[in-house]
Amino acid sequence: MSGSSIAVGQRGLAILGARGGRPALDAGAFPVYRLLALQTALVALLLAALGFTYRGEDINLMIAVLAAMVGLATLLRWRGSPRLAAGIGGCAILGAAGMAGACLSPLVGTIGFPYRDGSLAAADELLFPFLSWPDLARSLSKQAELTALMCRIYSTLLWQPFLLVAIFAALGRTDSIWRFLHAWTLTLIACVAIFAVAPAQAAYVHYGFVPADVPYLTANTGWWPTEILERVRTGQLRELGTDQISGLITFPSFHTAAAVLLAWGFRRVPFVGPLFVLLNLAMIATVPLIGSHYFVDVLGGIAVALLAIAGSRTARRVGVFS
């Protein structure tokens, strides 16, 4: 099917359910919704196939809030407020895609491929012979203020993408919202797919560190996710809740990939954009020690993000974002 046919078909679908001549959805949102539908379908299929249950009191509330946001966004678009609709809908997609990706990671973790920590550590030694991950981690154990600052920078991932979507909406750049979300969701799916065949326990565990060795590290990224992954792999855990869908992926680092995507998105935001580009460069620097990642995980995250950006650019060229 030609690119023009795809674009025409999607514009036609967008008109369905329109009120007063206004489309129910922005045509540029369709690639993102398709990827979100794929994630959701995979979660449902794997839950049933693997005999998992989920904690309804945790997850149902999150689903209800996200559904309400999508409904509000649709209403606002019908009522002629496309900027506000895109901002609210985009934030809902961010939350839904993140939750779907977090649910998929323990589900695919049941596949049980061998841990790749040895290979990842060997890659670090080959590519970064001048850096010693254990030595850097030990030096962090004595730096309370530096560790606290790095943890704060690392945790900005929790709100930065929502801020970027809100800024794009305020500026009327709805195409930028959908392209950013397309790249974001592609990155999530790619990271989960790679994790399925290349799981790892994380660097702190591999190198024999315990929480007491890094007392100022407030982000429990090294031990709790590994414990969850091990329980999933051994069949001890077959229920998903908010505690069980924390980030389990070591390689490639989604945190790094997200920082690249955020820097790419903020780069053309007036006034504050350059500051956020610098913030995301700093976030990448925190990934190995705060996120318990090997150095090569960072390279993997950068590669996945760049491929996702290229993929979103290709989608734009064939008319998806026109």
Image (tube, grey):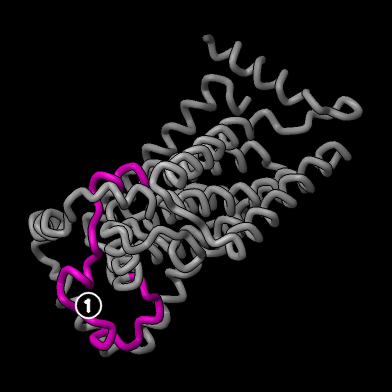
The location of residue 225, given as percent across then percent down, is 34, 66
Rendering quarter of residue 95: bottom right
Q: Is residue 94 above or below residue 210?
A: above
Q: Residue at x 32, y 63 (%)?
A: 236
- Which residue: 38% across, 50% down? 107
Region of the chain picked out in magenta, as a range: 192-221
- Amino acid type at mark 1: Ala
Q: Is residue 200 magenta?
A: yes
Q: Tell me the crowding category of disc 1: few under 14, some 14 to 19, or many 20 or more residues within 10 angstroms, Cα based.
A: many
Residue 216 image offset from top left, x and y in percent:
35, 86
Whether 154 is drawn above or below 128: the answer is below
> Circle 1 sits on which residue?
137
Q: How many marks?
A: 1
Q: Is residue 235 left or right of residue 60?
A: left
Q: Which residue: 32% across, 59% down?
A: 232
Residue at the far front: name it. Answer: 51
Residue 220 visible (yes or no) = yes
Image location (x, y in percent) of residue 190: 37, 41
Provide residue 178's location: percent of width, then percent of height: 60, 39
State yes or no: residue 262 in magenta: no
